[in-house]
Image (cartoon, rainbow, N blue to C red):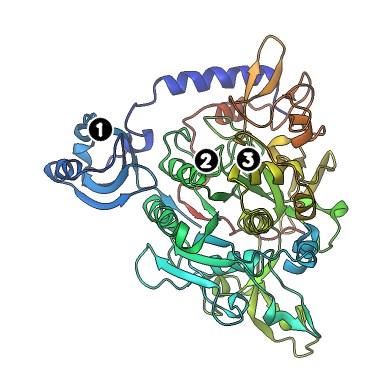
Amino acid sequence: MKLTLKSLLALLAMSASMSAVQPNKISADLKDQKDNGLVEVIVQLASTVSNADQDKIKALGGLVKRLHKSFDGMTISLPASRIEKLSDDPNVLYITPNRKVGRMLDTAVSTVGGDVARMWGYNGEGITVAVIDSGVNAVGDLNGRYSSRVVYSESFVGGSANDGFGHGTHVAGIIAGDGDDSLFLGIRKLTGVAPSARIVSLKALADDGSGDDSSVLAALDRVLALKSLYNIRVVNLSLGRRIYESYSSDPLCRAVESLWKAGIVVVVAAGNNGRDNSMGTKGYGTINSPANDPYVITVGAMKDNGTTWRADDAIASYSAKGPTQIDHVVKPDIVAPGNKIVSLLSSVNSRLAVDYPANRVPVSYYRLDLTKALSTSYFMISGTSMATPMVSGAAALLLQKEPDLTPDQVKARLMKTAYKSFPYSTTAVEPTTGEQFVSYYDIFTVGAGYLDIDAALSTTEVAQGSAVSPSVTLNASTNTVSMVMPAGVVWGSGVVWGTGVVWGTGVVWGTGVVWGTGVVWGTSNPQGTGVVWGSGVIWGTSGMSAESTVPGEN
């Protein structure tokens, strides 16, 4: 089923009417809270937090819990009855709740050209990737010749910085695991994309995989503080939550933009809601925050189907699709292998290992071991969380080769060189229920294409200008939906970096047109149109979580 252009007109009108009534300074989900007790909120200010600002919070009966440096703001607790009074302060820009956030490698890396990169001598040496997740344990494959390549660890959720959940270590292994524990007959079978890169571990998700905006913001602040000391060039965010407001007001988006503008490539998981039809959208409009920010590289998940060639690969039906709610940004930017990825196991006692024992892999997966013993080093997970570190590792390789590349140039290079040959559609079948999920290979499903590290390293083209992702709009007079390019953007009508080159002719028709007459997507259900183009619809789970708690697809 596909969404009609007539319905799109209705969506645009609904979006405009909703945005007109949105509160200026207090987010809708905070204003609707019925709790009259203390609430924890994030306050965005027009200037640097001063002692006077903190005194005002105390005078209102509140407590300042954390200051934020990636943008001018603070996390505070305050009586709910005093929020309106706080919003009257002329230095207060916007107030949001402290929202909850949450939670095979050898063929996958080869599929995207990681093995070729190693043959050329690119392994991420000298580059540090910050992993904001559930922590990273310094297990064997993350040890260097003389010391651990996990060079810094800190927890922002209290307690130990160790990875009791098991998600962050798995992510770090995809980025930088050296495969030593899978060494057999001189061959390392389970090697990450950038196996000599260093890791800064910033624990923003607790041992149950949950976290909140404030802990993620604190971790992002620490990235800025440690950037020069450790040469942090990339940050990986395999986490997310639903969208509540425009990216221009969302504190997570404001923070990741600060890192981007400071010269750090930010790579974010699109989310795993691509099968969600609760809104009547067939999974469209389900990109999470901060993956909705137009600056960052947003990553969807592919299935490599256990081979190293791309012809049999398919999009994972759970991979979230664009456009983003409220701002209608074209997302994801790129896709990478994320289904049934075998990477590092933080501990046999980790939450994921205990909750998903079937995801333990046998030693025989990578060695000739007839005992069928379960590995204590590796574990299988699926999700856009696993696709995201593939791209983070690729960014590290590019920066090792060309250290002067800016985040915009890295993003543009990866998107332009992405593999763009896709089928029109594929169908995934849920093995337990028989339910079918049809995926179309449009711009909101695969973005600019499939990560190709070999191609990205082979080219010397350097983009000049911003690489922010475009948005889309409907032209009612021509019945076409087109991309809107911000001023100074690298892609536009140019021959080298035009839309047909970067996104491919298979998903873009004409000059920036992504939906023409008769070209449809999603569903004709009016409910679906109101969700995608509106701004006040709740979908999925409200908590932020690690983006990988989905079963693998066949």
| 3D distance between C-alphas at marks 3 and 1 | 41 Å
Q: Position of residue 40 (x, y in %)?
A: 28, 48
| Label 1 Cα neighbours within 10 Å, binned few <14 / some 14-19 / many ≥20 | some
Nearer-the-camera pick, 399 or 140: 399
Estimate how packed mark 2 is, as few (under 14), some (14 to 19) or many (20 or more) residues with alpha carbons within 10 Å: some
* Three-letter code for the amino acid on which mark 3 is drawn: Asn
| Precedes in sequence: disc 1 or disc 2 | 1
Mark 1 = which residue?
91
Question: Label 1, label 2: how many angstroms apart (C-alpha)?
Answer: 32 Å
Q: Quadrant of the C terminus?
A: bottom right
Q: Which residue is mark 2?
A: 539
- Whichever of labels 2 and 3 marks the residue nearer the N terminus, that label is 3
Give the structural element (helix, strand or loop) at label 1.
loop
Task: Give the answer, above or below, for where 432 lies relative to 413.
Answer: below
Q: Outermost residue, left direction?
A: 59
Which amino acid does the dot numbered 1 rest on? Asn
Given the current orientation, which residue lies at the most extreme bottom position? 371
Choose top left, top right, bottom left or bottom right for residue 383. Answer: bottom right
Sequence-earlier tag: 3 or 1: 1
Quarter of the image containing the N terminus? top right
Dot in front, 3 or 1: 1
Which one is closest to the eye, mark 1 or mark 2?
Answer: 1
Q: Which residue is mark 3?
A: 277
